[in-house]
Amino acid sequence: MKALVYHGTRDVRVEQAPDPVMTQPDDIILRVTATAICGSDLHLYRGKVPGLKSGDVLGHEFMGIVEDIGPGVTKLARGDRVVVPFTISCGQCFYCEQSLYASCEKSNPGRGAIVNKKSATPGAGLFGYTHLYGGYAGGQAEYVRVPYANVGPLKLPQGLDDEQVLFLSDILPTGYQAVLNGGVKRGSTVAIFGAGPVGWMSAACARLLGAERIFIVDHHPYRLRFAEEAYGCEAINFDECDDPAEEILVRTGHHGVDASIDAVGFEAKGSTVETVAANLKIEGSAGTVLRWCIAATRRGGIVSVPGVYAGWIHGFLFGDAFDKGLGFKMGQTHCQGLMPELLEHIMEGRLKPQNIITHRMRLADAVQAYEIFEGRKEECRKVVLRP
């Protein structure tokens, strides 16, 4: 089959890769009909995440048609059209039974990304996301093996285009979990740091839940403009505003917002010290956005972190968070528990995640697509690839 294969930092190639084969009774083989490039894929593309090997197939946002099923598959049949969550979950372990699917302790044979791991179990395996998370082949390919198929894939009704439902695989439930973790409700004030796909999905879901004011912080004018037009956000460009957290405080009567959402993660644009430290592997993540979140959130508010972090963080200012009595909620997305509800919102027209798509390209052109998305070229918001 054809697939996007990793060979090194900024070296990905569309080439022949081994066809997937089923290894467990509850596996399926999926023929991919649509896949997307995620901001998290760019962490891999830039060589920022350990555990990736030459020859690995990337991609964790995908959907398609069931081509083959194992003898233990009871909820799907050949020919079913499904969207697949990026987290791989068994559905039966201690965590899955609590609907904490991203914490599944059976699906990941890797060690996870915890530095001070001790004897803790790893989190769930992830498609196309390094051997720390199981080394599973990803979905930027013509075919993919999907394990635990009775738990993950969501069967889709007729009448919905791929683009309407593709983002149920990751960024839509990630944005939804972010606002749920932030306690967002009718009348809430929210600050979203990062006007990218997860930031936009967070804004869409915050509006769905009745948020009154949404601030969004970034430094790409076209991304901020889209957030204003599509979701009614109040945009703040940190290239033009030295202190976006102070700006938010001023605009909210010096209290701050009820919830701040860090939709950027560990590759946030940091100080010179943070940039040097990260390059030298002295620390894993820049703390700029977390400092803004802590400063911009009102006393007793919540900081929600869907953005990916790893290792140590410079200047976390935990004492400020303590003084303000802030709550923190974060982590990978428990997609399986959120996808059915979000599908209903899509079917009823309350959510239109496909509106963020700007580029539709062939899988054969995936190398160019990565260059466009990574470089913010052509005002690219989101790329969808079709094999």
Image (spheres, helix red, strand yellow):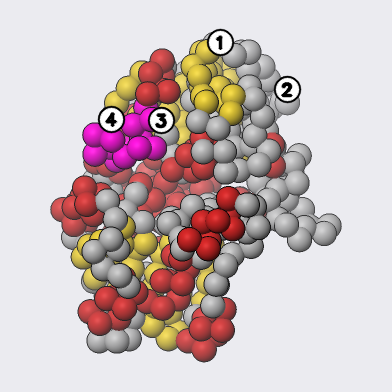
Q: In the drawing, what numbered circle is on residue 16?
A: 1
Magenta-drawn stretch contains 6: no
Magenta-drawn stretch contains 373: yes
Q: Quadrant of residue 157?
A: top left
Front of the two marks 2 and 3: 3
Does 95 sit left or right of 383 as displayed? right
Residue 297 drawn above or below residue 222: below
How many residues crowd mark 2 within 10 Å: few (<14), some (14–19), many (20+)? few
Q: In the drawing, what numbered circle is on residue 370?
A: 3
How many residues crowd mark 3 within 10 Å: few (<14), some (14–19), many (20+)? some
At 76% across and 61% down in the image, what residue appears?
A: 116
The Cα–Cα distance between marks 3 and 1, rounded to whole angstroms, is 18 Å
At 31% across and 57% down in the image, what residue appears?
A: 218
Residue 18 drawn above or below residue 154: above
Q: Choose the circle earlier in sequence order: 2 or 3.
A: 2
Front of the two marks 3 and 1: 3
The Cα–Cα distance between marks 4 and 1, rounded to whole angstroms, is 24 Å
> What are the residue bounds of the magenta stretch?
369-382
Number of marks in the image?
4
Residue 294 drawn above or below residue 162: below
Q: Secondary structure at mark 1?
A: strand
- The secondary structure that dominates the magenta segment is helix
Q: Choose the circle earlier in sequence order: 3 or 1.
A: 1
